[in-house]
Amino acid sequence: MRDSMMKKMLIGLLALGLCFGGNALAMEGMDHGSGHDSKKMDHGSSHDMKKMDHGSKKMDHGSMKGKDGMIMMDGETVDGVSAMAHLKDVRKAMAEAGMEATHHLMIMFEAESDARPIEEGSAAVKITIPGDKELEPLMMMGMVGHFGVDINMAEPGIYHFKVGTKLDDGKKRTFHFHHVVE
């Protein structure tokens, strides 16, 4: 019994490692609008921000998929902080670990004034699933280069993400994102 549980935990940790290790490769070479110059942000491994340009809120990334199934959602800037949201399909790895999560939601925050990555503070997400049912808030874990949480998006329809933050400057901000699962 204990060996089985340890095996599941190990597989889960390995699955998460695969998710984060592939993030830089999944986003490399994608150009989405106006630039961040050559600032680097560490998402498990460094990549050049010139190649990953997120642009403004006006762009619709709801259906934009990168390599390895990375889904980029619209970016949003609130009170001097830009937020870039991504979803990574992790259902296969999670299923192998006996877990129900289908996606890893990751949000990268950046100071608009100097393109400095913001990795300190706290973030939580409140998800509204298809059928307009709002789930309990989930704390997002601070990770290298982003805040993240594993979620279940198995049902088709529109998912709304309301992300509340209190980042390193102590200000509270709320960011909104959405994605349609077909």
Image (cartoon, rainbow, N blue to C red):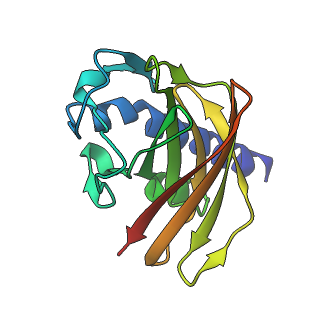
* Residue at (63% x, 39% y) in the render: 10
Q: Is residue 153 visible?
A: no
Between residue 160 and residue 170, name the one nearer to us. 170
Between residue 161 and residue 138, name the one nearer to us. 161
Q: Looking at this view, name the residue that lies furthest to the bottom.
A: 131
Query: Residue 164 at x, y = what percent?
Result: 67, 48
* Residue at (42% x, 30% y) in the render: 21
* Residue at (30% x, 32% y) in the render: 25
Query: Residue 45 at x, y = what percent?
Result: 41, 20
Between residue 67 and residue 52, name the one nearer to us. 52
Left or right, 150 with reference to 3: left
Quarter of the image for the N terminus: give it.
Answer: bottom right
Quarter of the image for the C terminus: give it.
Answer: bottom left
* Residue at (61% x, 64% y) in the render: 127
Q: Looking at this view, name the residue that lies furthest to the front.
A: 79
> Number of marks in the image?
0
Q: Looking at this view, name the residue that lies furthest to the right.
A: 2
Query: Residue 78 at x, y = what percent?
Result: 54, 41
Q: Can residue 115 be seen in this view?
A: yes
Is 106 situated above or below 129? above
Is 48 situated above or below 174? above
